[in-house]
Amino acid sequence: MQRSIFSVLLGFIVLQASYSAWTQTQTIALKPIRLNVQPKGFFILEVIDNRAITTNIGKIWSRPQPLTAQLQGGTANALESFLKKNFNPVNTDSLTPILLTINELRISETLTPENRVKGEVKMILGYETYREGRRVLLTNGNAATTYTRAGVVPEEMIESVIRKLLENELKGFNNWFAKGIKTSDLLAREVKLILEEETLIDHGDTLYYHAKRPLNWSDFQGAPSVLSRWAAQVFTSFGFEARTVVANRVIELYVRPKIWIDKTISWVRPGSKNDYVLDHEQLHFDITRLAAERFKRYLQKMTFSVEDFSSELQYQYIDFYRVHSQLQIQYDNETGHGTNQAAQAAWVKKVRDELRSYGVTPARP
């Protein structure tokens, strides 16, 4: 009999404890009131709660002890349901989907000596979207407010404060989006390639490829190599400059190829300055121009991703530069560094004919 009574009493105590814990929670329901802000160009697709503790939004004061506040249905579900009904436009087919992340939403209240309640609400939200199937952070926003209440039902005050902070946050993002849609690469939908021509020709120690400026012996300013037995050597290279401009959700990718020689390390031996040797070195320069032209035409066929266009551009450049280096070696091997005149003539015709097919006038005929 004693064990039975003890069991009953223990069960009663557990029940009372559970009931006490249940009564220490205050549920707040957001009122279905339309926010005083109209989204322009976007809608809230989903709300994601990134907080470490997602079960509540903090403590509020209510006699005889603080209560744990929670939004009805859970924080993320409550905000998502509210925004879809009271913020999103009706037709979202052509609009940008936004993922709203809750990074902080916290309420704290204290009781003052005057038996009034001072409260603070902090809200930090993140705004993301999908780009090529991946989530991309656009921007963050934060807001906070304090209040004092007395004789006001706590959930009435807090519900109103949360709605107002949410409205202010969305107004800020609305303004950011209106500007970002025109200028931010994060919201771009495509990449448009625009090739530019190099305008420099002879610039100090650097000579850029130009039809009106063939090589001459004054460009060979370096000391002859003691490790080489050949008459001359020209050091050519090609690269590019790139810049972007965003306009109406399009990334305009401006690429300016550059083809040049370095005069300071290009050299010729005394007694070897004749037209035949100079034309052999000029064809090295022509081959570099040819590699750059092939690079340009390959870029024009590409579809760049908005996510990684810079890496894609760099990868193609490295690949074409590698092929360019192999072509230079092949040219010297097949012509015996110009000593095989028949092979030299064949290379001259092949390279310069291809340049002409691209609309490029060779610097030497």
Image: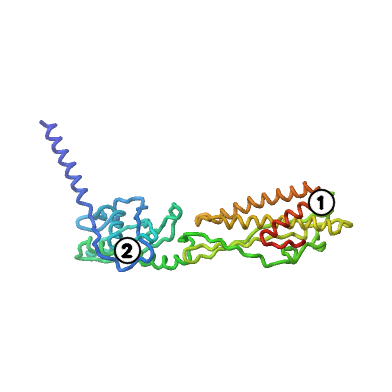
Residue 273, position as x, y percentages in the image? 86, 59
User: Residue 147 lies in what quarter of the image?
Assistant: bottom left
User: Residue 275 lies in what quarter of the image?
Assistant: bottom right
Q: How is the image coloured?
A: rainbow
11 or 50, which is in the foreground? 50
Q: How many marks?
A: 2
Residue 38, position as x, y percentages in the image? 33, 67
Residue 6, position as x, y percentages in the image? 14, 35
Q: Name the mark on residue 338.
A: 1
361 w.r.t. 73: above or below: below
356 or 291, which is in the foreground? 356
User: Mark 1: which secondary structure?
Assistant: loop
User: Residue 223 lies in what quarter of the image?
Assistant: bottom right
Which residue carries the number 2 mark? 89
Q: Is residue 149 left or right of residue 217?
A: left
Residue 117, position as x, y percentages in the image? 25, 63
362 or 29, which is in the foreground? 362
Q: Name the mark on residue 35.
A: none
Residue type at numbered disc 2: Pro
Q: Is residue 260 left or right of residue 71?
A: right
Quarter containing the N terminus: top left
Quarter containing the C terminus: bottom right
Q: Earlier in the sequence, mark 1 or mark 2?
A: 2
Closer mark to the observer between disc 1 and disc 2:
1
